[in-house]
Image: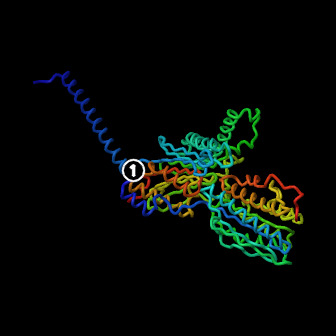
Amino acid sequence: VSLKTKKKIEEDFMGMPGGKMSARPLHFFWILDCSGSMYGEKVGALNNAIREALPHIRKVADENPGVQVYVRALRFSNGADWIIKDPVKIDSFIWEDIKINIGEMTNLGAGLSLLNEALPSIPERSLPPVIVLVSDGQPTDDYKTSLVKLKQNPFGEKAARVSVAIGRETDLDVLQDFIGKESKIKPVQANNPQDLVEYIKVVSTRAVKIASQVVKVKDVEKIVPETVNKDDDDTW
Amino acid sequence: MMMTLGDFSKRFMRETVNLKSRVCREFKEFREILWNVNRKLFPQKKLFGISVKGASHKKNGIPCQDAVFCIKKRGFVFAAVADGHGSADLSDTGSKVAVEVAFSVLEKSFKKLRKKLAQNRTMETALKDIEEKWRRTVKKHYLDNYMEEAGGTFDDAVYDRYGTTLLFCIVFGRTVIASQLGDGEIVFVKADGETYNPLPESSRSVANSTESICENGAAKNFRTYIKTYTMKEKNPFVILLSTDGYPNSFETKDDFLQVGGDMAQIIKTEGFSTIENNLEEWLNCSSTSGSGDDATCSVICLGGFELWNLK
């Protein structure tokens, strides 16, 4: 390359043909149940679990140089609102404890509806998103309509959808419906704070890992942890 | 001095031979000049393509699953790229088979393809042949190499292990045929640097999902562009074929399309050799700074093709 052209390439093309380059975005969503029943130890454990999971998600992201993980979080109770609305890079993501109001409902449908509003903003070249639903109860609104819409969206359909149940009172059928009734992925049930920390960590990191590697989405079946703690330690 | 009839005859023959050889020599020289003028005015079509292993593949010890095949034959140029699926363990073989099979089928169909009225029908048949031949070849590969694992039987699910996309382009005379199955990009670049996709987008190529040649009836999922350009039409100066690892390294689609315009500019100012010398490095850099995936790009420069537009 002649000096003249080289200089031109450096100036105009930033060294190479084409425009700006960057790693492929991977959008990660926490969908968190903040109903009244989460009050007390459960929400404390959830805050702790998410905080514990973050360094592990960062590590997975670092291991995949072609991926940039962006995190968002939303809560649902009587309605739904964003905890973190704009995507934040995992490197600079800080978790601030969520608080619970006693007596609030479990409007999962409102939460999924809010998520549906955000999906069209995902850039076309993004990897399949990861959506982690954490809940401890049964929906108190019509969640099915929002869920159908979620699965109709190309990114919603292809997303690595996983869910963590907190305690035995959770409606696992709803969580399975969220994942997909035909899916081999099952919701994981945490019956004590230690399990919750472990499951949130494992499920989140594996989902990111699978979605990060340029592989078919069917491999998300490998997300669910193989081992489940014994019933002896159950507190919920 | 009188010349005898015999002498005259001999001399006539000698002169005739001399004249003939002079005419031949001059005709050869004329042809040489014409050829050189033609080469200057209508440079030969050039093509180059290369695959590089993705940054994440290097890190995780995964082979390059992309393949590329470029060839210039008498009467046509052909380029193909393929991207073996990441989840398919034998897709590096699947992609190589795909580009080779595409070439062999189109080479055989070339005579028919030249007949303008039969082009659509010939391509339909060719795409079916590509699908069938790909399936036959990978089946043979599997049975030859994994006989023990196969246990003497062959399950159709094995095709998924060889799954790949396939994009190819054949150019002859003033005709361009481009066809694509699955993700990746075929980009046409006009002489003024304007870029465009000649093929419609696939609704299935989102969030890492893609059509594949391993699917039953894959031939009908090819998107195909056939066009014979007239003297008055603006035709492509450069054609790019790339697997998705390259475009996915750019922030937006426009950032990637700019590659076409920049390459056309480089070819015009520096010549095609600059592309040949630098493409590998460009792809490596894009994979490292971008998608981390294998990246493949094939560049066809139609050269004098474009000059037909000059008045």
Above or below, B175 against A112 in this view is above
Q: Which residue carries the number 1 mark? A: B42
Chain of residue at mark 1: B
**Image-quadrant location for residue A157:** bottom right
The answer, for residue B229, to whether it is visible in the render is: yes
**Residue lying at 72% horizontally and 70% vertically, measured from the top left:** A73
In-front residue for pair B266/A67: A67
Report whether A165 appears left or right of B186.
right
In-front residue for pair B163/B287: B287
* SS assignment at label 1: loop
Above or below, A185 against A117 in this view is above
**Image coords of residue B156 (percent x, y):** 75, 42
**Image coords of residue B218 (percent x, y):** 68, 48
Which quadrant is the C terminus of chain B positioned in?
A: bottom left
Report whether B72 appears left or right of B199.
left
The answer, for residue B233, to whether it is visible in the render is: no
**Residue lying at 84% horizontally and 78% vertically, measured from the top left:** A102
In-front residue for pair B223/A193: A193
Amino acid at the residue labelled 1: Phe
Report whether B180 appears left or right of A194.
left
Report whether B44 appears left or right of A223.
left
Crowding at mark 1 (Cα within 10 Å: few <14, some 14-19, many 20+): some
**Image coords of residue B198 (percent x, y):** 56, 58
**Image-quadrant location for residue A151:** bottom right
